[in-house]
Image (cartoon, helix red, strand yellow):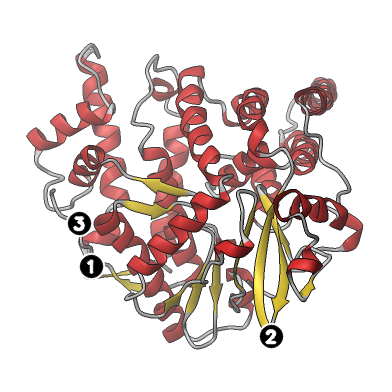
Amino acid sequence: MADEIKVPEKKIQSSIPTSKVERATKFVKTGVKVGANYVKHYAQKMVNPEMGTEALDKANAEDIYGALSELKGSALKVAQMMSMDKNLLPQAYSDKFTMAQYSAPPLSYPLVVKTFQSYFQKSPTEVFDTFSKEAVNAASIGQVHKASKNGKEYAVKVQYPGVAESISSDLKMVKPFAKQILGLQEKDLVMYMGEVEQMLVAETDYELELRRGVEISEACAHIANIDFPKYYPEYSSKRILTMDWLTGQHLSEFLMTNPSQEVRNKIGQAMWDFYDYQMHELLSVHADPHPGNFLMRPDGTMGIIDFGCVKVIPLEYYRVHFKVINPQIIENDEIMEKAFYELGFIYEDDSQYEKELFSGIFRDMIRLTVSPFRTPTFDFGNDEYFKLLYGFGEKLAKTPELKNSTKPRGSKEALYLNRTYFGLYSMLNQLKATITTHTSWKIR
Protein backbone atom coordinates (compact mmCIF):
# COMPACT_ATOMS: atom_id res chain seq x y z
CA MET A 1 0.00 0.00 0.00
CA ALA A 2 1.15 3.59 -0.56
CA ASP A 3 2.64 5.47 2.37
CA GLU A 4 1.55 8.79 0.85
CA ILE A 5 -2.14 8.60 1.77
CA LYS A 6 -2.75 9.98 5.25
CA VAL A 7 -6.19 10.83 6.56
CA PRO A 8 -6.44 13.94 8.76
CA GLU A 9 -7.53 13.05 12.29
CA LYS A 10 -10.28 15.66 12.31
CA LYS A 11 -12.19 13.67 9.67
CA ILE A 12 -12.29 10.45 11.68
CA GLN A 13 -15.82 9.04 12.02
CA SER A 14 -16.84 7.55 15.38
CA SER A 15 -19.91 5.63 14.20
CA ILE A 16 -21.83 4.49 11.13
CA PRO A 17 -25.63 4.27 10.93
CA THR A 18 -26.19 0.52 10.54
CA SER A 19 -29.93 -0.08 10.95
CA LYS A 20 -32.34 0.39 8.04
CA VAL A 21 -34.18 3.10 9.98
CA GLU A 22 -31.00 5.08 10.74
CA ARG A 23 -29.79 4.85 7.16
CA ALA A 24 -33.19 5.69 5.70
CA THR A 25 -33.42 8.72 7.99
CA LYS A 26 -30.07 9.96 6.67
CA PHE A 27 -31.27 9.61 3.09
CA VAL A 28 -34.53 11.42 3.85
CA LYS A 29 -32.67 14.33 5.50
CA THR A 30 -30.38 14.56 2.50
CA GLY A 31 -33.37 14.51 0.16
CA VAL A 32 -34.86 17.45 2.09
CA LYS A 33 -31.58 19.38 1.71
CA VAL A 34 -31.47 18.66 -2.02
CA GLY A 35 -35.09 19.76 -2.34
CA ALA A 36 -34.27 23.02 -0.55
CA ASN A 37 -31.35 23.56 -2.94
CA TYR A 38 -33.76 23.26 -5.89
CA VAL A 39 -36.23 25.71 -4.32
CA LYS A 40 -33.41 28.21 -3.79
CA HIS A 41 -32.14 27.68 -7.34
CA TYR A 42 -35.53 28.25 -9.00
CA ALA A 43 -36.19 31.32 -6.83
CA GLN A 44 -32.89 32.82 -8.00
CA LYS A 45 -33.61 31.80 -11.58
CA MET A 46 -36.84 33.81 -11.54
CA VAL A 47 -34.71 36.89 -10.85
CA ASN A 48 -31.94 35.86 -13.26
CA PRO A 49 -33.31 33.58 -16.04
CA GLU A 50 -29.83 33.21 -17.59
CA MET A 51 -28.39 31.59 -14.46
CA GLY A 52 -26.89 28.12 -15.03
CA THR A 53 -26.99 25.05 -12.80
CA GLU A 54 -23.35 25.15 -11.58
CA ALA A 55 -24.19 26.46 -8.09
CA LEU A 56 -27.10 24.00 -7.76
CA ASP A 57 -24.92 21.06 -8.82
CA LYS A 58 -22.19 22.09 -6.37
CA ALA A 59 -24.61 22.40 -3.43
CA ASN A 60 -26.28 19.07 -4.23
CA ALA A 61 -22.93 17.34 -4.72
CA GLU A 62 -21.74 18.59 -1.30
CA ASP A 63 -24.90 17.41 0.46
CA ILE A 64 -25.15 14.04 -1.28
CA TYR A 65 -21.47 13.21 -0.90
CA GLY A 66 -21.57 14.28 2.75
CA ALA A 67 -24.37 11.81 3.44
CA LEU A 68 -22.86 8.97 1.40
CA SER A 69 -19.44 9.34 2.99
CA GLU A 70 -21.00 8.98 6.45
CA LEU A 71 -23.08 5.96 5.42
CA LYS A 72 -20.19 4.27 3.57
CA GLY A 73 -20.95 1.07 1.71
CA SER A 74 -23.00 0.59 -1.43
CA ALA A 75 -24.19 4.15 -1.81
CA LEU A 76 -20.66 5.57 -1.60
CA LYS A 77 -19.41 2.86 -3.96
CA VAL A 78 -21.97 3.93 -6.58
CA ALA A 79 -20.68 7.52 -6.25
CA GLN A 80 -17.12 6.28 -6.75
CA MET A 81 -18.13 4.32 -9.85
CA MET A 82 -19.99 7.26 -11.37
CA SER A 83 -17.04 9.59 -10.76
CA MET A 84 -14.86 7.46 -13.04
CA ASP A 85 -16.96 8.33 -16.10
CA LYS A 86 -16.42 11.96 -17.09
CA ASN A 87 -19.52 11.85 -19.32
CA LEU A 88 -21.83 10.50 -16.66
CA LEU A 89 -21.90 13.34 -14.14
CA PRO A 90 -21.99 17.13 -14.10
CA GLN A 91 -18.50 18.43 -13.22
CA ALA A 92 -19.40 19.38 -9.64
CA TYR A 93 -20.55 15.83 -8.86
CA SER A 94 -17.56 14.27 -10.61
CA ASP A 95 -15.12 16.45 -8.66
CA LYS A 96 -16.75 15.65 -5.32
CA PHE A 97 -17.44 11.96 -5.87
CA THR A 98 -13.85 11.36 -7.01
CA MET A 99 -12.94 11.73 -3.34
CA ALA A 100 -14.63 8.37 -2.74
CA GLN A 101 -11.79 6.71 -4.67
CA TYR A 102 -9.21 7.75 -2.10
CA SER A 103 -10.32 9.49 1.04
CA ALA A 104 -13.69 8.80 2.60
CA PRO A 105 -13.71 9.74 6.31
CA PRO A 106 -12.24 6.72 8.18
CA LEU A 107 -13.69 4.95 11.18
CA SER A 108 -12.37 5.52 14.68
CA TYR A 109 -10.01 2.95 16.17
CA PRO A 110 -12.48 1.54 18.78
CA LEU A 111 -14.76 0.36 15.97
CA VAL A 112 -11.80 -1.35 14.29
CA VAL A 113 -10.98 -3.10 17.58
CA LYS A 114 -14.60 -4.23 17.88
CA THR A 115 -14.43 -5.84 14.42
CA PHE A 116 -11.24 -7.69 15.34
CA GLN A 117 -12.75 -8.95 18.56
CA SER A 118 -15.80 -10.21 16.68
CA TYR A 119 -13.72 -12.36 14.31
CA PHE A 120 -10.52 -13.16 16.21
CA GLN A 121 -11.55 -12.64 19.85
CA LYS A 122 -8.42 -10.47 20.02
CA SER A 123 -7.57 -6.81 19.52
CA PRO A 124 -5.40 -5.77 16.53
CA THR A 125 -2.34 -5.34 18.80
CA GLU A 126 -2.81 -8.88 20.13
CA VAL A 127 -2.79 -10.24 16.57
CA PHE A 128 0.09 -8.05 15.31
CA ASP A 129 3.17 -6.55 16.94
CA THR A 130 2.20 -3.08 15.69
CA PHE A 131 -1.03 -1.75 14.18
CA SER A 132 -1.68 1.84 13.04
CA LYS A 133 -4.57 3.35 14.96
CA GLU A 134 -5.28 5.73 12.08
CA ALA A 135 -6.32 4.35 8.71
CA VAL A 136 -3.82 5.02 5.93
CA ASN A 137 -6.51 4.73 3.28
CA ALA A 138 -10.30 4.86 3.59
CA ALA A 139 -12.70 4.12 0.73
CA SER A 140 -16.30 3.02 0.25
CA ILE A 141 -16.35 -0.55 1.59
CA GLY A 142 -13.48 -0.59 4.07
CA GLN A 143 -10.31 1.07 5.28
CA VAL A 144 -6.67 -0.02 5.39
CA HIS A 145 -4.30 -0.06 8.37
CA LYS A 146 -0.58 -0.76 8.39
CA ALA A 147 0.58 -3.57 10.68
CA SER A 148 3.74 -5.55 11.39
CA LYS A 149 4.64 -8.90 12.89
CA ASN A 150 8.08 -10.44 13.33
CA GLY A 151 9.60 -7.65 11.26
CA LYS A 152 7.21 -8.10 8.30
CA GLU A 153 4.81 -5.33 7.21
CA TYR A 154 1.18 -5.97 6.32
CA ALA A 155 -1.79 -4.09 4.90
CA VAL A 156 -4.93 -4.95 6.85
CA LYS A 157 -8.28 -4.07 5.27
CA VAL A 158 -11.16 -3.75 7.73
CA GLN A 159 -14.72 -3.61 6.44
CA TYR A 160 -17.10 -0.97 7.76
CA PRO A 161 -19.85 -2.28 10.09
CA GLY A 162 -23.22 -2.91 8.46
CA VAL A 163 -22.00 -2.48 4.87
CA ALA A 164 -22.72 -6.02 3.71
CA GLU A 165 -26.12 -6.17 5.39
CA SER A 166 -27.38 -2.88 3.93
CA ILE A 167 -26.55 -3.32 0.23
CA SER A 168 -30.05 -3.97 -1.07
CA SER A 169 -31.82 -1.32 1.03
CA ASP A 170 -29.10 1.28 0.36
CA LEU A 171 -29.33 0.85 -3.40
CA LYS A 172 -33.10 1.27 -3.27
CA MET A 173 -32.66 4.52 -1.34
CA VAL A 174 -29.87 5.89 -3.54
CA LYS A 175 -31.89 5.16 -6.68
CA PRO A 176 -33.83 8.48 -6.71
CA PHE A 177 -30.57 10.43 -6.40
CA ALA A 178 -28.99 8.44 -9.22
CA LYS A 179 -32.07 8.94 -11.37
CA GLN A 180 -32.03 12.70 -10.77
CA ILE A 181 -28.28 13.15 -11.27
CA LEU A 182 -27.90 10.85 -14.27
CA GLY A 183 -31.21 11.55 -15.97
CA LEU A 184 -31.72 7.81 -16.49
CA GLN A 185 -34.99 6.07 -17.16
CA GLU A 186 -36.39 3.48 -14.74
CA LYS A 187 -35.62 0.57 -17.12
CA ASP A 188 -31.95 1.50 -17.26
CA LEU A 189 -31.67 1.96 -13.50
CA VAL A 190 -33.26 -1.43 -12.81
CA MET A 191 -30.69 -3.15 -15.02
CA TYR A 192 -27.81 -1.05 -13.67
CA MET A 193 -28.66 -1.42 -9.99
CA GLY A 194 -29.29 -5.16 -10.30
CA GLU A 195 -25.80 -5.80 -11.67
CA VAL A 196 -24.24 -3.40 -9.14
CA GLU A 197 -25.98 -5.17 -6.25
CA GLN A 198 -24.72 -8.57 -7.36
CA MET A 199 -21.15 -7.29 -7.66
CA LEU A 200 -21.29 -5.47 -4.31
CA VAL A 201 -22.44 -8.60 -2.49
CA ALA A 202 -19.30 -10.31 -3.77
CA GLU A 203 -17.14 -7.28 -2.95
CA THR A 204 -18.11 -7.35 0.73
CA ASP A 205 -17.02 -11.00 1.07
CA TYR A 206 -13.33 -10.75 1.97
CA GLU A 207 -12.90 -14.54 1.96
CA LEU A 208 -13.98 -14.53 -1.69
CA GLU A 209 -11.65 -11.59 -2.39
CA LEU A 210 -8.76 -13.52 -0.87
CA ARG A 211 -9.41 -16.55 -3.11
CA ARG A 212 -9.77 -14.39 -6.21
CA GLY A 213 -6.69 -12.37 -5.36
CA VAL A 214 -4.63 -15.54 -5.08
CA GLU A 215 -6.06 -17.07 -8.27
CA ILE A 216 -5.64 -14.02 -10.51
CA SER A 217 -2.25 -12.98 -9.16
CA GLU A 218 -0.89 -16.51 -9.66
CA ALA A 219 -2.35 -16.67 -13.19
CA CYS A 220 -0.84 -13.27 -14.08
CA ALA A 221 2.53 -13.75 -12.36
CA HIS A 222 4.30 -14.12 -15.73
CA ILE A 223 3.35 -10.59 -16.88
CA ALA A 224 6.37 -8.28 -16.85
CA ASN A 225 6.73 -5.34 -14.44
CA ILE A 226 3.76 -6.06 -12.17
CA ASP A 227 3.55 -7.71 -8.78
CA PHE A 228 0.84 -8.56 -6.31
CA PRO A 229 0.63 -8.88 -2.53
CA LYS A 230 0.63 -12.27 -0.85
CA TYR A 231 -2.54 -12.92 1.16
CA TYR A 232 -2.66 -14.37 4.68
CA PRO A 233 -5.73 -16.49 5.52
CA GLU A 234 -4.62 -16.89 9.14
CA TYR A 235 -5.01 -13.11 9.63
CA SER A 236 -8.14 -12.79 7.50
CA SER A 237 -11.87 -13.40 7.84
CA LYS A 238 -15.12 -12.50 6.10
CA ARG A 239 -14.69 -8.83 7.11
CA ILE A 240 -10.90 -8.53 7.60
CA LEU A 241 -8.31 -9.10 4.87
CA THR A 242 -4.55 -9.16 5.43
CA MET A 243 -1.93 -8.98 2.69
CA ASP A 244 1.63 -7.85 2.09
CA TRP A 245 2.32 -4.14 2.33
CA LEU A 246 3.27 -3.00 -1.18
CA THR A 247 5.23 0.18 -1.80
CA GLY A 248 4.49 2.66 -4.55
CA GLN A 249 2.56 5.79 -5.41
CA HIS A 250 -0.92 6.31 -6.75
CA LEU A 251 -1.17 7.85 -10.20
CA SER A 252 -1.50 11.52 -9.21
CA GLU A 253 1.48 11.39 -6.80
CA PHE A 254 3.50 9.38 -9.30
CA LEU A 255 2.95 11.90 -12.10
CA MET A 256 4.10 14.71 -9.80
CA THR A 257 7.57 13.09 -9.80
CA ASN A 258 7.77 13.79 -13.55
CA PRO A 259 8.61 10.24 -14.69
CA SER A 260 10.30 9.76 -18.05
CA GLN A 261 8.31 8.73 -21.11
CA GLU A 262 10.12 5.39 -21.01
CA VAL A 263 8.87 4.70 -17.48
CA ARG A 264 5.33 5.88 -18.36
CA ASN A 265 5.27 3.52 -21.34
CA LYS A 266 6.65 0.65 -19.27
CA ILE A 267 3.95 0.99 -16.61
CA GLY A 268 1.24 1.58 -19.20
CA GLN A 269 2.25 -1.54 -21.13
CA ALA A 270 2.19 -3.63 -17.96
CA MET A 271 -1.30 -2.33 -17.19
CA TRP A 272 -2.51 -3.09 -20.72
CA ASP A 273 -1.01 -6.60 -20.70
CA PHE A 274 -2.58 -7.33 -17.30
CA TYR A 275 -6.08 -6.46 -18.47
CA ASP A 276 -5.67 -8.04 -21.89
CA TYR A 277 -4.64 -11.38 -20.38
CA GLN A 278 -7.48 -11.41 -17.86
CA MET A 279 -10.11 -10.52 -20.43
CA HIS A 280 -9.16 -13.06 -23.05
CA GLU A 281 -7.48 -15.91 -21.21
CA LEU A 282 -9.08 -15.92 -17.76
CA LEU A 283 -12.55 -14.57 -18.70
CA SER A 284 -12.40 -12.99 -15.26
CA VAL A 285 -11.20 -9.43 -14.73
CA HIS A 286 -10.19 -6.99 -11.98
CA ALA A 287 -13.12 -4.64 -12.63
CA ASP A 288 -12.18 -1.75 -10.34
CA PRO A 289 -9.55 0.09 -12.40
CA HIS A 290 -9.38 3.35 -10.50
CA PRO A 291 -5.98 4.85 -9.63
CA GLY A 292 -6.21 3.88 -5.97
CA ASN A 293 -5.60 0.24 -6.85
CA PHE A 294 -2.27 0.72 -8.65
CA LEU A 295 1.02 1.49 -6.91
CA MET A 296 3.58 2.87 -9.35
CA ARG A 297 7.34 3.03 -8.89
CA PRO A 298 10.24 4.99 -10.44
CA ASP A 299 11.74 1.84 -12.01
CA GLY A 300 8.63 1.26 -14.15
CA THR A 301 7.15 -1.54 -12.03
CA MET A 302 3.72 -1.50 -10.45
CA GLY A 303 1.89 -3.24 -7.62
CA ILE A 304 -1.78 -4.16 -8.12
CA ILE A 305 -4.19 -4.54 -5.20
CA ASP A 306 -7.89 -5.04 -4.41
CA PHE A 307 -9.56 -8.03 -6.04
CA GLY A 308 -12.90 -7.44 -4.39
CA CYS A 309 -14.59 -6.31 -7.61
CA VAL A 310 -14.00 -9.09 -10.15
CA LYS A 311 -16.25 -9.48 -13.18
CA VAL A 312 -16.62 -13.06 -14.38
CA ILE A 313 -17.40 -12.95 -18.11
CA PRO A 314 -19.90 -15.59 -19.28
CA LEU A 315 -18.46 -17.42 -22.28
CA GLU A 316 -21.53 -16.86 -24.46
CA TYR A 317 -21.43 -13.13 -23.76
CA TYR A 318 -17.68 -13.01 -24.37
CA ARG A 319 -18.17 -14.53 -27.82
CA VAL A 320 -20.62 -11.84 -28.90
CA HIS A 321 -19.04 -8.86 -27.12
CA PHE A 322 -15.57 -9.35 -28.53
CA LYS A 323 -16.96 -10.31 -31.90
CA VAL A 324 -18.44 -6.84 -32.42
CA ILE A 325 -15.35 -4.97 -31.25
CA ASN A 326 -12.98 -7.05 -33.37
CA PRO A 327 -11.75 -4.48 -35.94
CA GLN A 328 -11.35 -7.26 -38.50
CA ILE A 329 -15.10 -7.87 -38.79
CA ILE A 330 -16.70 -4.57 -37.75
CA GLU A 331 -17.63 -3.79 -41.36
CA ASN A 332 -19.36 -7.17 -41.86
CA ASP A 333 -23.01 -6.09 -41.81
CA GLU A 334 -24.45 -9.60 -41.48
CA ILE A 335 -22.33 -10.54 -38.46
CA MET A 336 -22.82 -7.16 -36.81
CA GLU A 337 -26.61 -7.13 -37.19
CA LYS A 338 -26.92 -10.60 -35.66
CA ALA A 339 -24.66 -9.59 -32.79
CA PHE A 340 -26.63 -6.38 -32.16
CA TYR A 341 -29.77 -8.45 -31.59
CA GLU A 342 -27.89 -10.77 -29.21
CA LEU A 343 -26.47 -7.82 -27.26
CA GLY A 344 -29.82 -6.07 -26.87
CA PHE A 345 -28.82 -3.05 -28.94
CA ILE A 346 -31.79 -3.64 -31.24
CA TYR A 347 -34.97 -5.74 -30.92
CA GLU A 348 -37.18 -7.66 -33.35
CA ASP A 349 -40.16 -5.42 -32.56
CA ASP A 350 -38.22 -2.19 -33.16
CA SER A 351 -39.39 -0.14 -36.12
CA GLN A 352 -37.14 -0.12 -39.17
CA TYR A 353 -36.22 3.46 -38.29
CA GLU A 354 -35.20 2.40 -34.77
CA LYS A 355 -33.17 -0.54 -36.05
CA GLU A 356 -31.24 1.63 -38.48
CA LEU A 357 -30.80 4.46 -35.95
CA PHE A 358 -29.55 2.29 -33.06
CA SER A 359 -27.41 0.11 -35.32
CA GLY A 360 -25.73 3.24 -36.64
CA ILE A 361 -25.21 4.71 -33.16
CA PHE A 362 -23.66 1.55 -31.73
CA ARG A 363 -21.55 0.90 -34.83
CA ASP A 364 -20.11 4.43 -34.54
CA MET A 365 -19.49 3.91 -30.83
CA ILE A 366 -17.67 0.63 -31.47
CA ARG A 367 -15.54 2.12 -34.27
CA LEU A 368 -14.42 4.84 -31.88
CA THR A 369 -13.74 2.63 -28.86
CA VAL A 370 -11.75 0.04 -30.85
CA SER A 371 -9.43 2.67 -32.35
CA PRO A 372 -6.51 1.51 -30.14
CA PHE A 373 -6.75 -1.96 -31.69
CA ARG A 374 -6.52 -0.76 -35.28
CA THR A 375 -2.79 -0.02 -35.20
CA PRO A 376 0.20 -1.97 -33.78
CA THR A 377 0.81 0.82 -31.26
CA PHE A 378 -1.46 3.51 -29.85
CA ASP A 379 -0.64 6.84 -28.22
CA PHE A 380 -3.03 7.17 -25.28
CA GLY A 381 -1.60 10.62 -24.67
CA ASN A 382 -3.44 11.79 -27.78
CA ASP A 383 -5.98 14.15 -26.23
CA GLU A 384 -7.77 14.57 -29.55
CA TYR A 385 -8.87 10.94 -29.37
CA PHE A 386 -10.25 11.46 -25.87
CA LYS A 387 -12.05 14.62 -26.94
CA LEU A 388 -13.79 12.53 -29.60
CA LEU A 389 -14.56 9.84 -27.02
CA TYR A 390 -16.02 12.26 -24.48
CA GLY A 391 -17.80 14.22 -27.20
CA PHE A 392 -19.47 11.06 -28.46
CA GLY A 393 -20.56 10.25 -24.91
CA GLU A 394 -22.14 13.69 -24.56
CA LYS A 395 -23.89 13.20 -27.90
CA LEU A 396 -25.34 9.87 -26.73
CA ALA A 397 -26.57 11.43 -23.50
CA LYS A 398 -28.50 14.02 -25.51
CA THR A 399 -29.92 11.64 -28.14
CA PRO A 400 -33.71 11.73 -27.53
CA GLU A 401 -34.35 8.30 -29.06
CA LEU A 402 -31.95 6.74 -26.54
CA LYS A 403 -33.26 8.75 -23.60
CA ASN A 404 -36.88 7.96 -24.47
CA SER A 405 -36.47 4.34 -25.52
CA THR A 406 -38.87 2.05 -23.68
CA LYS A 407 -36.26 -0.74 -23.66
CA PRO A 408 -32.75 -0.90 -22.21
CA ARG A 409 -30.15 -0.81 -24.97
CA GLY A 410 -27.33 -3.22 -24.20
CA SER A 411 -26.61 -6.10 -21.84
CA LYS A 412 -26.09 -5.86 -18.10
CA GLU A 413 -22.94 -7.93 -18.66
CA ALA A 414 -21.39 -4.92 -20.41
CA LEU A 415 -21.70 -2.54 -17.45
CA TYR A 416 -18.56 -3.63 -15.65
CA LEU A 417 -16.65 -4.48 -18.83
CA ASN A 418 -17.27 -0.99 -20.22
CA ARG A 419 -16.34 0.50 -16.85
CA THR A 420 -13.12 -1.54 -16.86
CA TYR A 421 -12.08 -0.40 -20.33
CA PHE A 422 -12.99 3.20 -19.57
CA GLY A 423 -10.91 3.14 -16.38
CA LEU A 424 -7.99 1.55 -18.24
CA TYR A 425 -8.14 4.07 -21.10
CA SER A 426 -8.40 6.96 -18.64
CA MET A 427 -5.32 5.94 -16.64
CA LEU A 428 -3.30 5.33 -19.82
CA ASN A 429 -4.32 8.79 -21.00
CA GLN A 430 -3.12 10.37 -17.75
CA LEU A 431 0.16 8.44 -18.07
CA LYS A 432 0.47 9.70 -21.68
CA ALA A 433 1.63 6.18 -22.49
CA THR A 434 2.23 4.72 -25.93
CA ILE A 435 1.23 1.06 -25.91
CA THR A 436 1.72 -1.99 -28.10
CA THR A 437 -1.93 -2.95 -28.34
CA HIS A 438 -1.58 -6.59 -29.20
CA THR A 439 -4.50 -8.61 -27.97
CA SER A 440 -5.02 -12.29 -27.34
CA TRP A 441 -8.73 -12.31 -28.17
CA LYS A 442 -10.06 -15.02 -30.37
CA ILE A 443 -13.45 -16.07 -31.61
CA ARG A 444 -14.13 -18.89 -29.17
Question: Which residue is depicted at the point 25% across and 58% down?
Answer: 281
Q: Position of residue 342 (x, y in %)?
A: 21, 29
Q: Quadrant of residue 366?
A: top left
Against 195, residue 275 (above or below) is below
Q: Earlier in the sequence, mark 1 or mark 2?
A: 2
The dot on residue 248 is: none
- Left or right side of 285 for 182: right
Label 3 residue SS = loop
> In the image, which is nearer the foreground, mark 1 or mark 2?
2
Tell me the residue that label 1 is attached to: 438
Q: Residues within 10 Å of mark 2 (few under 14, many from 20)?
A: few
Name the kind of residue labelled 2 in the image: Gly
Tell me the residue that label 3 is attached to: 441
Question: Which residue is depicted at the point 62% across and 46% down?
Answer: 80
281 or 156: which is nearer to us? Answer: 156
Q: Position of residue 115 (x, y in %)?
A: 76, 50
Q: Residues within 10 Å of mark 1 (few under 14, many from 20)?
A: some
111 or 136: which is nearer to us? Answer: 111
Name the kind of residue labelled 3 in the image: Trp
3D distance between C-alphas at marks 3 and 2? 44 Å
